[in-house]
Image: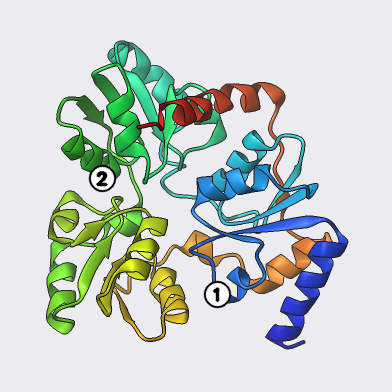
C-alpha cells in the first residue's frame, strides 16, 4: 500500500472501530494528517475527555496516555508504541520524592505534567509549560519544590521572584543539550530570524531567545507574527510542521540534535496496526492511582485563573 492508501485505511478503521486519534505535535506529519486532535500532551487529554468515542489512541509517549486515562477512566486508552517512554518522566519516581518529602515538609510539590501517574499521586499540583508561571504565582505557599525539570523550574523561578523555589537535577535531555553556541551559530546563519525556544531549554539559551513558550505557544507566535523567518528551539518536527502550515515563511531548527527518539518510535504503520486492533498497548491504571493522581490535576485547573 502507498502512504495515502494506509492513511485512508486508518481514517476508515478509526471510524468503524469508534477510535479517537490523538497526536502530539512532535509526531511525524503523516500521523498528524490522520489525527482527530493535534497539540500538547495535556491539551490532548482535555480534548479526549469531551469526545464520545469509546477508545482513545495516544500517538505520543506513556505519561501522555496515562494522563488520558486519568481524565477519561471510563474509556479504553491505547499507547501507539509500547516502548515510547519519556526520559524526563522516568528520572524521578514516587519512592524518590517520598524520601525527600520530610526535607521539604513545608513546601508545595509542583509536578510538571511530564511525570508518571504514580508520581502524580503524591504531588500537590500539576503544571504545563504554558500554565506553570501563572499557577506557581497563584499558590498561596511561598515555598515550592518544582519537579522534575530544573530548566522549566528555573524559568518559573525567574518569573516568580517572590517564591522560594527549590529545584532537583532533572529535565529533558534533548532540550537541555542545546547551548548558547547553538543560538549564536543559528543567528549567524539566519540573521534577522526570531529565535523561539521551549522553557525546557537551559536558562542561558532562554536568555538569548526572542520568545520562550510551550510548543503550542511557539506555533501560535509564528502564526501571528509578521516576521518571515524563525529559528525553532524545540523538537525538530515543529519546524517541519510549520513549513507545511506557512509555506511563505522560513523555519530553521535551532539544532539538528533536537530529536525525541521516543516520539519517533511511532510510525504510520503503528497507527494502522492500532486501529486494526493488533498493535499498541492498553493503559491500565488502578482506581486509587487514578483518583490520587487526578487531585493534582484538579488543583492545576483550580489555580489556573487570573
Pick the front one: 269 or 130:
130
**Residue 79 in picture, x, y percent from top left:** 66, 52
Residue sitting at x 82%, y 61%: 278
**Residue 38 in picture, x, y percent from top left:** 56, 61
Q: Which mark is residue 149?
A: none
**Residue 52 in picture, x, y percent from top left:** 78, 47
Q: Is residue 90 above or below residue 31?
A: above
Left or right of 95, for residue 178 = left
Q: Which mark is in front, 1 or 2?
A: 1
- Would residue 276 be visible to someone looking at this image? no
Residue 33, by quadrant, is: bottom right
Residue sitting at x 33%, y 82%: 249
Left or right of 112, for residue 5 = right
Residue sitting at x 44%, y 32%: 126
Q: Is residue 233 above or below residue 133?
A: below
Q: Circle 2 sits on which residue? A: 151
Residue 193, by quadrant, is: bottom left
Q: Circle 1 sits on which residue? A: 29
Amino acid at each position: 500500500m502507498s502512504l495515502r492508501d494506509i492513511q485512508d485505511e486508518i481514517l476508515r478503521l478509526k471510524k468503524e472501530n469508534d477510535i479517537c486519534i490523538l497526536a502530539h505535535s512532535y509526531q511525524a506529519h503523516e500521523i498528524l494528517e490522520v489525527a482527530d486532535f493535534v497539540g500538547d500532551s495535556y491539551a490532548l487529554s482535555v480534548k479526549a475527555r469531551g469526545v464520545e468515542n469509546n477508545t482513545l489512541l495516544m500517538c505520543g509517549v506513556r505519561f501522555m496516555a496515562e494522563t488520558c486515562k486519568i481524565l477519561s477512566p471510563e474509556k479504553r486508552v491505547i499507547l501507539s508504541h509500547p516502548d515510547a517512554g519519556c526520559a524526563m518522566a522516568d528520572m524521578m519516581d514516587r519512592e524518590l520524592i517520598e524520601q525527600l518529602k520530610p526535607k521539604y515538609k513545608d513546601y508545595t510539590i509542583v509536578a510538571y505534567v511530564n511525570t508518571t501517574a504514580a508520581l502524580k499521586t503524591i504531588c500537590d499540583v500539576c503544571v504545563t509549560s504554558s500554565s506553570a508561571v501563572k499557577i506557581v504565582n497563584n499558590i498561596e505557599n511561598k515555598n515550592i519544590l518544582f519537579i522534575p525539570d530544573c530548566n522549566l523550574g528555573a524559568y518559573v523561578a525567574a518569573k516568580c521572584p517572590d517564591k522560594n523555589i527549590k529545584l532537583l537535577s532533572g529535565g529533558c535531555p534533548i532540550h537541555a543539550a542545546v547551548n548558547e553556541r547553538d543560538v549564536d551559530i543559528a543567528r549567524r546563519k539566519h540573521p534577522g530570524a526570531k529565535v523561539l525556544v521551549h522553557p525546557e531549554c537551559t536558562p542561558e539559551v532562554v536568555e538569548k531567545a526572542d520568545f520562550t513558550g510551550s510548543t503550542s505557544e511557539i506555533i501560535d507566535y509564528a502564526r501571528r507574527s509578521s516576521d518571515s523567518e524563525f529559528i525553532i528551539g524545540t523538537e525538530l518536527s515543529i519546524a517541519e510542521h510549520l513549513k507545511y502550515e506557512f509555506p511563505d515563511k522560513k523555519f530553521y531548527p535551532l539544532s539538528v540534535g533536537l530529536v525525541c527518539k521516543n516520539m519517533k518510535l511511532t510510525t504510520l504503520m503503528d497507527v494502522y496496526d492500532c486501529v486494526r486492533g493488533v498493535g499498541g498497548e492498553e493503559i491500565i491504571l488502578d482506581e486509587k492511582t487514578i483518583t490520587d493522581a487526578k487531585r493534582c490535576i484538579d488543583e492545576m485547573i483550580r489555580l489556573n485563573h487570573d
